[in-house]
Image: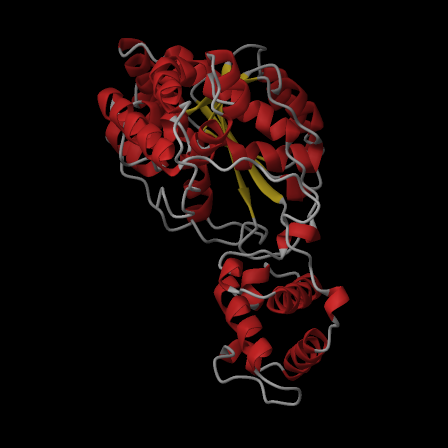
Amino acid sequence: MSVHSCQGPLHYVSQQSQVEALAQNIEPGIRVALDTEADSLHHYYEKVCLIQLSFGSHHYIVDPLAKVRVEPLLEKLAQCTLVIHGADYDLRMLRRQWGFEAHQLFDTMCAAQLLGYEELGLASLVKRCCGVTLCKSGQRADWSRRPLSPKLIEYATNDSRYLLCVAERLEHELRIRGRVEWHREMCQRILENVKCHNTARSEARQWRVKGWHTLKSSRAHAILRELWQWREREAQHADLPPFRILGNEMLVRLAAWTEATSAGDALPDFIPPHLASSVRRLESLRRAVEHARALPPEKWPRPSHVNCKQAPKPSKSLCEELKACRDEIAAKYDVPPQLITPSTALLEIAAARPHTCEELKAVSKLCNWQVELIGEPFLRIIRAHEHASDVSPASSNLFD
């Protein structure tokens, strides 16, 4: 597909008759470039605000906020191979909002990773594959606002406009390097993960925000959980993403301060100005802080390992040898080590010490191509450690 063929006409689809006509134009089995724009940076209840499609040298902006039913269109798209850049988020949003399930996928970001590209962003791939420089000015736009400016419509269109061309170039390179099957497996894994993903917000774990482990006591964890619940309530009330109320780092810092201070103490000076300027919100935070301080021990969260069977701890030396082996294989094939074997999978392998490639795959949940690369080398290392006496646990920052 030539870059020139990417310059076809744009159609803004905002009426039901237009949705129906677009669905009729989609032949089963064709490749369709797809992207979505959501409003997660601006609203608590995020939603798909645009669906961008490109195929047959035409480009379409479908506006779900125009009160159109997109289900007829999605039914046809389910019969196509979707070309998406970083498909996970788009597919999860479409599934959550409309129950959509894709069956064939070509993920351009995944392809670029398998080819060892260092720059994986869409703009970088379009520049590399098509020689076109994309504008990035719409990345933080509120896509729920109407009307959309011509500049934002152009930005949204460009997210799908060049995808088929990029996919064609990447697929050609994958074929030359014998990695088409690797890519097919990884795309299938993405589809499976989207299907199995539980979209429900689990409060039992959601409060464990980044940095929560720096709080060492169960009381501090209880305080953090209460502050997280306060932030959720405020975010829902204001229909804002939680980070717009209070960032995770500040939430953890406030939990530590609350544990270290006494009832009645004034709120700390590090409370951000946008929060301090709201009398109602500041008062609700004061109440949440005092409530968190007063929680009795029986209301504190229990350590996650309580009542759980203790998992076997991997040998530190075995972890280091497996990591070195993985890194050597990754260098040989010019791909990121984490793509060959993620650190979590490596630790699981080291703990389980599988004896066969089948056992290794079951333990790690890796793709066939990954097991083919690491299987025998890993098993040789594990066999050499079978009678080792070193059982010291791997440190938590072993792979940092």
Query: In this view of the protein, can residue 336 be seen by the observer?
Result: no
Q: Residue at x 58, y 37 (%)?
A: 311
Q: Is residue 277 left or right of residue 346?
A: right
Q: Nearer the viewer, residue 229 or 368?
A: 368
Where is residue 302? Give x, y as percent: 68, 56
Q: Residue 260: tell me if it is visible.
A: yes
Percent x, y of residue 203: 69, 53
Which quadrant would residue 382 be assigned to in this image? top left
Query: Is residue 367 found left or right of 13 in the rendered image?
Result: left
Q: Is residue 200 left or right of residue 398?
A: right
Q: In the rendered image of this protein, does residue 122 appear above or below residue 180? A: below
Could you say which is closer to the camera, residue 368 or residue 156? Answer: 368
Residue drawn at x 50%, y 18% as measured from the top left? 361
- Residue depicted at x 31% and y 9%: 178
Side of 228 relative to 82 (left or right): right
| Residue nearer the viewer, 41 or 216 | 216
**The N terminus is located in which quarter?**
top left
- Quarter of the image for residue 315 reads top left
